[in-house]
Amino acid sequence: MAEEKVLVVDDEEHIRELIKFNLEKNGYKVICADNGIDAVKLAKEQAPQLMLLDLMLPGMDGLDVCKEIRKDSNMSGMPIIMITAKGEEIDKIIGLELGADDYITKPFSVRELVARVKAILRRTTMKIVEKTFKIGNLAIDFGKHEVLKSEIRIDLTLKEFELLQILIKNKGRVMTRDFLLDKIWGYEYVGETRTVDVHIRHLRQKIEEDDKNPVYIQTIRGIGYRFNFGE
């Protein structure tokens, strides 16, 4: 297996070095940037498999970097874990709104950060042997992580694709928010079920004709979500 590359973006040198040391100890190749402008440049040039992105950066902050990454078709699927010194819910939600796959708040446990990186990269590189699934104007290739809407490719983040995949795989079942948090994020996310709602909203905006009146992803009030197979 090729060495996986992680881009670490933080303006504090000791934090960059701490993360770099621990990721390299776990077998990852690490490249670093101390500002947002260089982060976008390195992401384009080096094509990392994952980005650890600090929110507060000089030149271009983490939210703007996230925007740039998500609107570039060559990088839009790269997982982003946002690092923030702020603990307010609004910062977490804004990051998720802009396409971050996960976040971790300073001060953080290095062991937890490495575990999150491993979990995301493991899911990203995991081989799926199922055939293309088709319904209505959607075609999903689980092996290629590719979604076509009316034969036009749409770019989903890793978490958006995983949500769509698990909803489709669990035909006829209602997926609770807590279940989705556990299966997609892979660790305890106490009190953060809104994380699922944010990603579902983004997913609907991309795959539905009218995200305010969704056809594919149904909300089961007070419980969670279910994929509609039209049966």
Image (cartoon, rainbow, N blue to C red):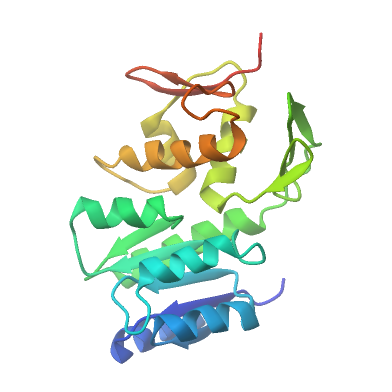
Q: Position of residue 210 (x, y in %)?
A: 54, 28
In the displayed structure image, the side of residue 134 where residue 169 appears, left or right: left
The N terminus - image quarter: bottom right
Q: Nearer the viewer, residue 207 or 180?
A: 207
Q: Residue furthest top?
A: 231
Examine the rendering and report whether any part of residue 29 can be seen. Answer: no
Residue at (35% x, 59% y) in the render: 103
Q: Position of residue 123 (x, y in %)?
A: 59, 53
Q: Which corner quadrant holds the C terminus?
A: top right
| Res 207 visible | yes
Number of callouts in the render? Answer: 0
The image quarter in which residue 86 lies: bottom left
Q: Where, by quadrant of the figure, is residue 112 drawn?
A: bottom left
Horizontal and vertical percent for residue 182?
41, 40
Compared to residue 221, the image places residue 98 above or below, namely below
Q: Is residue 67 above or below residue 12?
A: above
Residue drawn 23% across and 52% down? 90
Classify residue 20 as left or right of residue 208.
left
| Residue depicted at x 32% and y 19% | 222
State the image quarter where residue 13 is shown.
Answer: bottom left
The image shows residue 3 at horizontal and vertical percentages of 65, 77
Horizontal placement of 5 versus 21: left or right?
right
